[in-house]
Amino acid sequence: MTDESHIGPAVTDEARARVGTVTARYRSDPVSVRQIREYIAGTGGRPEELNDINDDELVAPPLFFHAACRPVVAEGDLQPDGQYPFLGVQGVSGRTMAGGHKYEVLAPVRVGDVLTVTERLADIAEKSGKTGPLVFVTTQSEYHNQRDELVARYRQTVIFR
């Protein structure tokens, strides 16, 4: 058995050539009151506070867009480290860790909205760290509603080591 802790990250030429291209696209289910309630409960809020708000006036919490567009994955399909199998970019491998993220919320998400996220590979940067080579993969995602209004942007960096 090989000790993979000493094997550094790998980047294929195909991955490098994909910088600037669309790497993923996903469409959400229509946003429901229940999804918003579950999100609020899951993030430490009080979903019962929505009881007095009419559904047509209900606005989802600011970062809800990100959860609404995350594909549902069976637990058995997660990576050994618990990550989603689509984390990162095809052609870049290694152990992953979070490198940072930035959210930009531009419009509210309401009950009934259908969101579409389009992810582009913004950059692949190879660097040397104290413990060896590192690869920084940065993606930029844009979220639009069914009226093609830009709802949010999300920039994420994943570090492969």
Image (cartoon, rainbow, N blue to C red):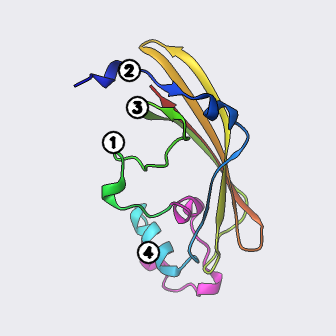
> Three-letter amino acid code at disc 3?
Arg
Q: Which tag is nearer the camera, tag 4 or tag 2? A: 2
Which residue is tagged 4? 47
Rounded to the nearest angstrom, the CA distance separating label 2 from label 1 is 17 Å
Which residue is tagged 3? 95
Chain part drawn in magenta: 46-70
The image's mark for residue 143 is none
The picture places residue 121, in percent across and down from the top left corner, at 66, 41
Rounded to the nearest angstrom, the CA distance separating label 1 from label 3 is 9 Å
Q: Earlier in the sequence, mark 4 or mark 2?
A: 2
Which residue is tagged 2? 7
Q: Residue at x 65, y 30 (%)?
A: 16
Q: Secondary structure at mark 3?
A: loop
> Three-letter amino acid code at disc 1?
Asp
Q: Secondary structure at mark 4?
A: helix
Rendered view: 154 above or below 137: below
Rounded to the nearest angstrom, the CA distance separating label 3 from label 2 is 9 Å
Q: Residue furthest left?
A: 1
Which residue is tagged 1? 81
